[in-house]
Amino acid sequence: MPDIHFYYLAKETISNLKMIFNSSDVPFLRLSKFLDIESVDYKPNLVDDENIGYFRRKKGPAILEDFWKSTEFIDFLCNVTDLNPKFSSANHLSYSAGDYSLLHMEESAPKRLAVVYDFTKKWRLEWGGNDLYFSPGKEHLICNRDYGSLMIVKLEKGDLSCTRYVSLKSKDSARIDFVTYDLD
């Protein structure tokens, strides 16, 4: 299992992250170089996942599923969010050129914590594939691809998230572990 970068485990850092998370209109954290990603054996077992609202999507078990379920990571989430997350699901997703998501796919989802870990290397801004978080009446949160970054977002019932359209000009795929934790 990979290790959390020591910087993110420091008492002062955790205190600062908690303050940032709890002061945002849409509570979120984006942490660069969160894990020692080079130590991860990246060999996804993906299958086509084409449904209405999806195109050229591949899906499989999360690369770091054991880590996302670990006491170490869940304790980290508790410490930086002041929430009590319970592991719900984890998948590895690959979005290819022309892929798109529809926001309405999460309309009935309960209050949750969404965690996205980015495995995408050498991504170009013009290829799209941004992660989008939408809370009614609030500013959209849009995140570009960033290899090795961890995104943590608190979503209420009725809030939506997706990975936006990937341009047909894309020469690569956006690759992420998408993890959901239920909140009381």
Image (tube, rainbow, N blue to C red):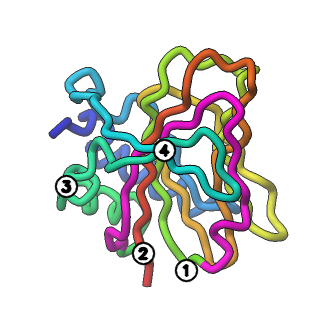
Residue 82 located within the stretch drawn in magenta: no
What residue is shown at x 59% (from left), y 68% (from top)? 155
- Mark 4 crowd level (few <14, some 14–19, many ≥20, 10 Å Cα): few
Residues drawn in magenta: 85-108
Please provide percent x and percent y for residue 53.
70, 55
Give SS at disc 3.
helix
The disc at residue 172 is none
Please provide percent x and percent y for residue 63.
29, 41
Please provide percent x and percent y for residue 75.
25, 62
Which of the marked residues, 1 or 3, is nearer the chain's N terminus?
3
Q: Which residue is mark 2?
A: 182
Residue 24 sits above or below residue 97 on the image: below
Q: Quadrant of residue 51?
A: bottom right
Residue 71 sits above or below residue 42 on the image: below
Q: Look at label 3 and name its amino acid.
A: Glu
The disc at residue 48 is 4
What residue is shown at x 45% (from left), y 51% (from top)? 178
Cα distance in 3D space between marks 3 and 4: 32 Å
Q: Which residue is mark 3?
A: 72
